[in-house]
């Protein structure tokens, strides 16, 4: 698990909660029919083209049900697969393979869907300096998984939560009495190494954010023409983020405005899971 950058304790916490939800007091069907000491082999196969993410998490699901698990992956996270490709072969307790199947697939399919979608967005800006960022529009409780999947698709993680980057939005600005006042209040209250981002919707607000010394300026729901002018005025004094209605068809034209990063909520908030199947191949 260490090689993924995921915290093992956090992963186990999420999986254990999922077990409580799905297994509860036990898999009454499998436990009634399958002998306790029976073993079996299974395969997971891609039923659509995409990018794989979540294999270490799926493995951990089965490991927690059978410590003698034999896990033989044919690909690794971040790899492209085609429909019909073998993803992994598994040998374990027959009960474990059936009890853990849906949970392992739920994680693997969702994360592979996120990685696959992210890879499409990343490909659109290939050859430019632009990076594709995720957002906080993730499934509650699964953020570390969702953001891990974005990385496996070639994307870049934005802030993890409300604690690791200060993002000043319109309501903050209103209550503070302006952008400069909002930035000053936050700057006084947070650690020096935490960056401050300011959301702007027009060139006047961009100018205020520049004068306030923002580390990142977000250009929110601006036209390409307005973003081009904003980038000129910012003139490399801070990082520039484009956000709002960033669908894949806009990416190349948005990248051409000179911005540095594009944040895309669609990477995680409405992902289509990658179709993956598990089949018992030997009893």
Image (tube, grey):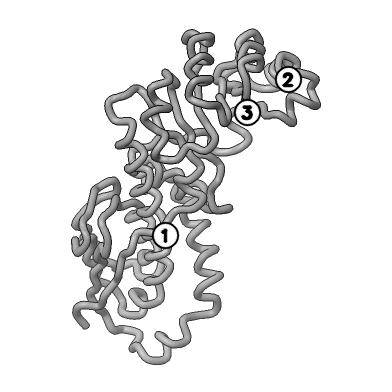
Instruction: Name the residue: 31% across, 79% down.
Output: 94
Between 103 and 85, the one lying in front of the other is: 85
Q: Is residue 70 visible?
A: no
As drawn, 117 above or below 196: below
How many residues crowd around disc 2 within 10 Å: few (fewer than 14), some, or many (20 or more)? Answer: many
Query: Does 54 sit left or right of 162 as displayed?
Result: left
Q: Is residue 42 visible?
A: yes
Q: CA distance from mark 2 to mark 3?
A: 10 Å
Q: CA distance from mark 2 to mark 1?
A: 40 Å
Label 2 sits on a secondary structure element that is: helix
Q: Which residue is mark 1?
A: 107
In the picture, the quarter occupied by the C terminus is bottom left
Q: Which residue is mark 3?
A: 167
Residue 96, percent from left and from top:
36, 75
How many residues crowd around disc 1 within 10 Å: few (fewer than 14), some, or many (20 or more)? Answer: many
Instruction: Name the residue: 20% across, 56% down.
Output: 82
**Nearest to N terminus: mark 2 or mark 1:** 1
Q: Which residue is mark 2?
A: 182
**Nearest to N terminus: mark 3 or mark 1:** 1
Label 3 sits on a secondary structure element that is: strand
Mark nearer the viewer, 3 or 1: 3
């Amino acid at each position: 698990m260490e090689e993924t950058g995921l915290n093992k304790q956090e992963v186990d916490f999420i999986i254990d909660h999922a077990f409580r939800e799905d297994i509860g007091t036990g898999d009454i069907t499998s436990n009634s029919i399958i002998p306790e000491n029976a073993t079996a082999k299974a395969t997971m196969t891609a039923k659509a083209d995409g990018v794989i993410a979540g294999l270490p998490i799926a493995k951990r699901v089965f490991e927690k049900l059978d410590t003698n698990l034999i896990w033989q992956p044919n690909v690794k996270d971040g790899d492209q697969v085609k429909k019909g490709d073998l993803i992994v072969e598994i040998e374990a307790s027959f009960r474990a393979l059936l009890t853990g199947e849906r949970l392992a697939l739920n994680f693997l399919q969702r994360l592979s869907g996120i990685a696959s979608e992210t890879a499409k967005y990343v490909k659109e800006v290939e050859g430019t300096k632009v990076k594709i960022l995720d957002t906080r529009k993730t499934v509650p409780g699964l953020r570390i998984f969702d953001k891990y999947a974005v990385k496996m698709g070639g994307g870049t993680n934005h802030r993890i939560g409300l604690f690791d980057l200060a993002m000043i939005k319109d309501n903050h600005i209103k209550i503070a009495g302006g952008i400069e006042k909002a930035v000053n209040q936050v700057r006084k209250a947070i650690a020096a190494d935490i960056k401050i981002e300011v959301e702007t919707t027009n060139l006047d607000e961009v100018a205020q954010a520049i004068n306030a010394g923002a580390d990142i300026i977000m250009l929110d729901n601006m036209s390409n023409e307005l973003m081009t002018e904003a980038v000129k005025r910012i003139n490399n004094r801070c990082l520039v983020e484009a956000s709002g209605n960033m669908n894949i068809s806009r990416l190349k034209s948005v990248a051409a405005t000179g911005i540095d990063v594009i944040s895309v909520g669609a990477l995680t908030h409405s992902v289509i899971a990658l179709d993956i199947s598990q089949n018992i191949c030997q009893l």
